[in-house]
Image (tube, grey):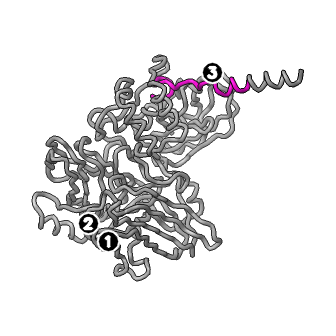
């Protein structure tokens, strides 16, 4: 009897274990992933070669999408997971990748269209409000339809008569079909103008850099999918008087003739006291032997390691590693006097075409006397498909395509107590009605009443699960001005008084935190 029961039990377990899992559907499972991670670039007028805004478009490109996500080509996000926690990560989780692959392998079913999420709304015009200064490249640059990459540096005078503190920089590509990425530097020496005068037409050709070392500042760059943000309250960058902005535009290969006139919106700080953060460049000065030792022999893979001792407590806001086409990997980390390792960034699979500034979600403290290490590996063999030389040639430091660079910008400032609690996930748009990564089956917000918000205003919402709710109020510089924690809320209609602490009249954002997710509701306050 026992033996018979045992056999039947094993048979039942076997039947259960081989039962096929339910195939994901587009409407319920795949569309949220595509809309959140792909559609910002894959839509009409953007740089991606095809649109992904509905079932038909995604289904038609399903095999290509499967290949791109399974190999990690898309979305284009190079830093290794858990080696630095960055703002606006364009990364799929293993679960999201599996969902897409299973959907494609399962025949790409559309599913119940009533479960299809709403297509995101992408703001037109400035996403940060009215800029204080607009700088535009001086000509409508003609991009030839010859399928060639172009890197062009445009020199634009700022016209400033005094130094200013920058609150935000917003890049506005003039033609998103061809503008692949934008880098920016502040030049106080006039060197950019001299290089411009030596080249015709407007601007000068350069590959991945300003074309000279002594720039006054390097600013966070832009690539498709980058979200413009204000720097945190009381923190900014310097824009110097009588200076030029060098705007490097990488124009992607195009099969048709196009025109572009990219512009930069700059917003200045209103605060009287601003902590300026600056960029420091890790260059071959910090490797044994200096620039003379930066030699990459033909047919070799070679690694260089720079070491720098941090002379005071520093707060790091972001990093920008840079190499050319021989680049293979880049890693930046610090080892504290207590032998703790601070992981700042690790790009294990370098791609020159996807580079930029990586800003941390929370500011990072690097203690005094820490050792800062930057390691970069270069592949100068025929196995590197991006090698500009055939056959490979010995390569040294330089700004041109056939030369290489060993460079990592570190954006930092002197540390102050509490800096590591400052978030850089500041509001991104003054026009958003609601930014939410909480599924609609968890919460539905009716609004904040009355407005303008006074001392008796409440947020009204319907909750579809029992949960502990955390709430905070942030200003448009990302500073938290009020909060409530661990509010037990039951299923059904609810009304919660807003946290106290709103200091003055203006626009604020109420953020609701549920189960690790955030919903943001902007409002106007009157004090």
Which circle, 3 or 1, is nearer the viewer?
A: 1
- Say which residue label 2 marks: 391
Residue farthest toward the right in the current orientation of the protein: 1
> Which stretch is magenta?
12-31
Classed neighbour count for the residue bearing mark 1: other residues with Cα under 10 Å, few (<14), some (14–19), many (≥20): some
Relative to the observer, which residue lies in front, 413 or 294?
A: 294
Does the magenta segment cover residue 399?
no
Could you give the CA–CA distance between mark 1 and mark 2, rounded to whole angstroms?
Answer: 8 Å
* 355 vs 114: above or below: below
Q: Could you tell which of marks 2 and 3 lies nearer the N-terminus? A: 2
Q: Is residue 241 above or below residue 257?
A: below
**Disc 2 packing (10 Å; few <14; some 14–19; many ≥20):** few
Q: Is residue 275 left or right of residue 164?
A: right
Q: Do tag 1 and tag 2 residues touch (Cβ < 8 Å)?
A: yes
Furthest-left residue in this view? 200
Mark 1 sits on what residue? 298
User: Circle 3 sits on which residue?
Assistant: 493
Look at the picture and state if 226 lies above or below 202. above
The mark nearer the N terminus, 1 or 2, is: 1
Measure how far apart labels 3 and 1 are at the Cα level: 69 Å
Task: Name the foreground residue: 424 vs 235.
Answer: 424
Q: Is residue 14 magenta?
A: yes
Question: Residue at horizontal 43%, vertical 36%?
Answer: 66
């Amino acid at each position: 009897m026992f033996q018979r029961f045992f056999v039947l039990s094993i048979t039942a377990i076997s039947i259960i274990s081989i039962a096929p899992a339910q195939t994901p559907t587009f409407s319920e499972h795949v569309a949220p992933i595509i809309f959140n991670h792909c559609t910002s670039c894959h839509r009409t007028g953007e740089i991606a070669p095809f649109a992904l805004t509905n079932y038909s478009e995604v289904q038609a490109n399903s095999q290509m999408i499967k290949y791109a996500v399974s190999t990690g080509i898309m979305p284009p996000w190079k830093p290794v997971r858990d080696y630095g926690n960055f703002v606006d990560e364009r990364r799929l989780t293993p679960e999201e990748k599996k969902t897409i692959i299973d959907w494609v392998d399962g025949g790409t079913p559309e599913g119940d269209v009533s479960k299809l999420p709403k297509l995101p709304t992408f703001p037109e015009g400035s996403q940060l409000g009215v800029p204080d200064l607009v700088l535009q490249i001086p000509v409508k640059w003609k991009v030839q339809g010859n399928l060639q990459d172009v890197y062009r540096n445009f020199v634009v005078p700022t016209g400033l008569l005094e130094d200013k503190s920058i609150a935000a920089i917003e890049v506005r590509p003039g033609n998103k079909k061809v503008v692949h990425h934008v880098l920016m530097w502040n030049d106080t020496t006039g060197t950019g103008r001299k290089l411009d005068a030596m080249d015709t037409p407007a601007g000068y050709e350069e590959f991945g850099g300003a074309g000279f070392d002594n720039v006054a500042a390097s600013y966070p760059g832009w690539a498709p999918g980058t979200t413009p943000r204000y720097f945190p309250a009381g923190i900014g960058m310097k824009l110097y008087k009588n200076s030029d902005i060098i705007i490097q535009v990488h124009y992607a290969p195009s099969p048709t003739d196009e025109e572009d006139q990219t512009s930069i919106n700059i917003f200045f700080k209103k605060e009287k006291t601003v902590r300026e953060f600056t960029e420091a460049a890790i260059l071959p000065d910090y490797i044994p032997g200096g620039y003379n030792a930066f030699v990459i022999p033909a047919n070799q893979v070679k690694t260089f390691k720079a070491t720098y001792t941090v002379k005071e407590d520093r707060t790091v806001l972001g990093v920008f590693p840079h190499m050319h086409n021989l680049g293979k990997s880049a890693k930046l980390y610090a080892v504290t006097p207590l032998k703790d390792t601070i992981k700042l960034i690790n790009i294990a699979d370098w791609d020159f075409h996807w580079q930029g500034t990586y800003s941390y979600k929370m500011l990072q403290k690097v203690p005094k006397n820490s050792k800062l290490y930057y390691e970069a590996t270069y592949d100068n063999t025929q196995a590197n498909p991006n090698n500009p030389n055939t056959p490979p040639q010995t390569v040294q430091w330089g700004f041109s395509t056939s030369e290489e660079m060993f460079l990592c910008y570190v954006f930092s400032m002197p540390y102050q107590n509490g800096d590591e609690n400052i978030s850089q996930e500041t509001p991104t748009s003054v026009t958003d009605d609601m930014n939410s990564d909480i599924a609609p089956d968890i919460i539905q917000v009716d609004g904040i009443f009355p407005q303008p918000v006074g001392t008796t205003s409440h947020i009204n919402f319907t909750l579809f699960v029992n949960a502990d709710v955390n709430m905070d109020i942030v200003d448009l510089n990302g500073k938290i001005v009020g909060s409530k924690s661990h509010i037990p809320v039951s299923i059904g209609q609810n009304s919660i008084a807003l946290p106290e602490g709103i200091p003055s009249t203006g626009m604020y954002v109420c953020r609701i935190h549920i189960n690790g997710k955030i919903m943001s509701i902007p409002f106007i306050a009157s004090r």
